[in-house]
Image (tube, helix red, strand yellow):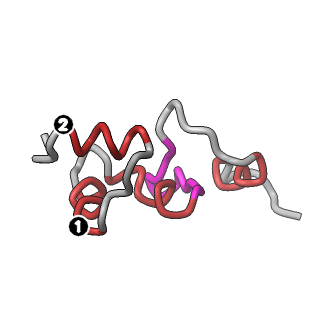
Amino acid sequence: MLGINRDALWRYESGKTTPNIDVVTKILNHPRFEKYALWFMTGKIAPEFGQIAPALAHYKQEDEKFSRPDRKMD
C-alpha cells in the first residue's frame, strides 16, 4: 500500500530501527493514516480537527483534554 518493504516495516514495528523522515512523510501523507499525524508527532489528539489516535494506542491521561472538546479547561 505504501511501497515499504516488509523487512523494513518489521524493523520499524519491532523497534529495531527508526524510519527516516521520507518514510514517515510517506506514511502520514497517505489518506488512510493522515488522521493520526498529530498523535504520531506529539502524542496528542484533536478529534474536532479529524486528528485521532489509533484504536490500540495508549496516550497519557493528561492528553485526555484533547479528546473532549466540550470539556471546560481549568
> Which residue does the image show at 41% across and 58% down from the upper left?
37
Residue type marked 1: Asp
Q: Is residue 56 magenta?
A: no
> Which residue does the image show at 82% across and 62% down from the upper left?
73
Residues under numbered marks 2 and 1 in contact, where contact means CB atoms less than 8 Å apart: no
When the figure is inspected, residue 56 is found, relative to residue 70, above or below; the finding is: above
Instruction: Give 4 or 54, whichever is nearer the viewer.
Output: 4
Q: Is residue 48 left or right of residue 9?
A: right
The secondary element bearing badge 1 is classed as helix
Question: How far from the left and from the top, in percent, is residue 9?
Answer: 26, 42
Q: Is residue 61 left or right of residue 40?
A: right
**Among the two numbered marks 2 and 1 on one chain, the one whose residue lies closer to the N terminus:** 2
- Residue that protrudes farthest toward the right in the picture: 74
The magenta-colored residue range is: 43-53
When the figure is inspected, residue 10 is found, relative to residue 24, above or below; the finding is: above
Per the image, the residue denoted by label 1 is: 22
Per the image, the residue denoted by label 2 is: 6
